[in-house]
Image (cartoon, rainbow, N blue to C red):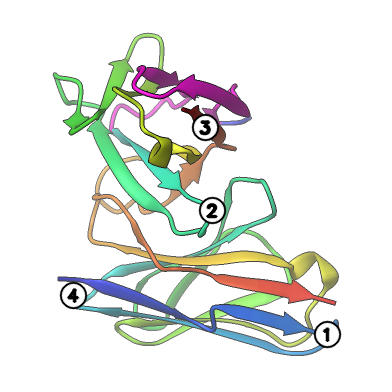
């Protein structure tokens, strides 16, 4: 069966510090991978998606970036965090047109 | 323009009763998919049910059913015999387009509280 991991689970970072969140998927190959952000009490905002190694599509221009160095690894990064980057970050995967399956998420608080 | 609309920010239901969560969508694409997810307080997103735009019958998964009214562009989630454990946020989502399209759009969610 497929499993999706995210770490860290919780992160508190000062404004201006860098960020690296990691997502890995097990039990499947060539998945589509997604990064979402959820502000407190809000819906999900798609940040990036990737259909293959090195292929990244950005949905919202901001100070975040994503990379896919391996087939089942998706990384969300920032060089300098802003207060507005606080939120709940969810990684998801799917194959083709089917439903997405989500990881456990990372709660990020920028102070 | 908002493509997924959930008009109920919060609602209550009595245990063992059926509850309907509303979702309307907007698309001009003939091929699309509609999804419902449950998000408990832990934050994980749990897939509940899927309806394809060409599916002739409403989707059902256990106590969950999707009331798909294509002409009205609505995809309401019906939970039969609600349980206390159904208390959570519920999100409606849509994937537009056929093969080669990978983007999903989410509504703002409905917070359901089931009362004993």
Along the line of sight, the residue nearer the viewer: B18 or A38? B18
Share a chain, discs 4 and 3? no
Relative placement, left or right, of A16 versus B77 is: right
* Label drawn at residue B112: 3
In 3D space, how far apart are the residues under numbered discs 3 and 1 (Cα atoms)?
34 Å
Tell me, for residue A14, which label it has, or none.
1
Instruction: Tell me the magenta residue range.
Output: B3-31
- CA distance for labels 4 and 3: 33 Å
Contact between labelled residues 3 and 2, with CB atoms less than 8 Å apart: no
Q: Label 2, label 3: how many angstroms apart (C-alpha)?
A: 11 Å
Question: Do the residues indicated by labels 2 and 3 lie within the same chain of the protein?
Answer: yes
Which residue corresponds to the image point at 23% horizontal and 61% vertical from the top-left? A95
User: Please, which chain is the residue tagged with disc 3 on?
Assistant: B
Instruction: List the residue tagged with mark 2.
Output: B41
Percent across and percent down for residue A87 are 68, 64
Give the labeled residue for mark 4.
Answer: A28
Q: CA distance from mark 1 to mark 4?
A: 36 Å
Q: Position of residue A111 (x, y in %)?
A: 85, 77
């Amino acid at each position: 069966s497929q499993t999706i991991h995210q770490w860290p689970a919780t992160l508190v970072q000062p404004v201006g510090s860098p960020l690296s969140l990691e997502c890995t998927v097990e039990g499947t190959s060539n998945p589509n991978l997604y990064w979402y952000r959820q502000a407190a009490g809000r819906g999900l905002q798609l940040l990036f998606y990737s259909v293959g190694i090195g292929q990244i599509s950005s949905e919202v221009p901001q100070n975040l970036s994503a990379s896919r160095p391996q087939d089942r690894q998706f990384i969300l990064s920032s060089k300098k965090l802003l207060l507005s980057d606080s939120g709940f970050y969810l990684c998801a995967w799917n194959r083709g047109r089917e439903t997405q399956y989500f990881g456990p998420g990372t709660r990020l608080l920028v102070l | 323009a908002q493509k997924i609309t959930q008009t109920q920010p919060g609602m209550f239901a009595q245990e063992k009763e059926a509850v309907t969560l509303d979702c309307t969508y907007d698309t001009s694409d003939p091929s699309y998919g509609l999804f419902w997810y449950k998000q408990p307080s832990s934050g994980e997103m749990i897939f509940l049910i899927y309806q394809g735009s060409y599916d002739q019958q409403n989707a059902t998964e256990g106590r969950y059913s999707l009331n798909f009214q294509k002409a009205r562009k609505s995809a309401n989630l019906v939970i039969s015999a609600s349980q206390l454990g159904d208390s959570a946020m519920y999100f409606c989502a849509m994937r537009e387009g056929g093969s080669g399209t990978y983007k999903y759009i989410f509504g703002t969610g409905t917070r359901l509280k089931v009362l004993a």
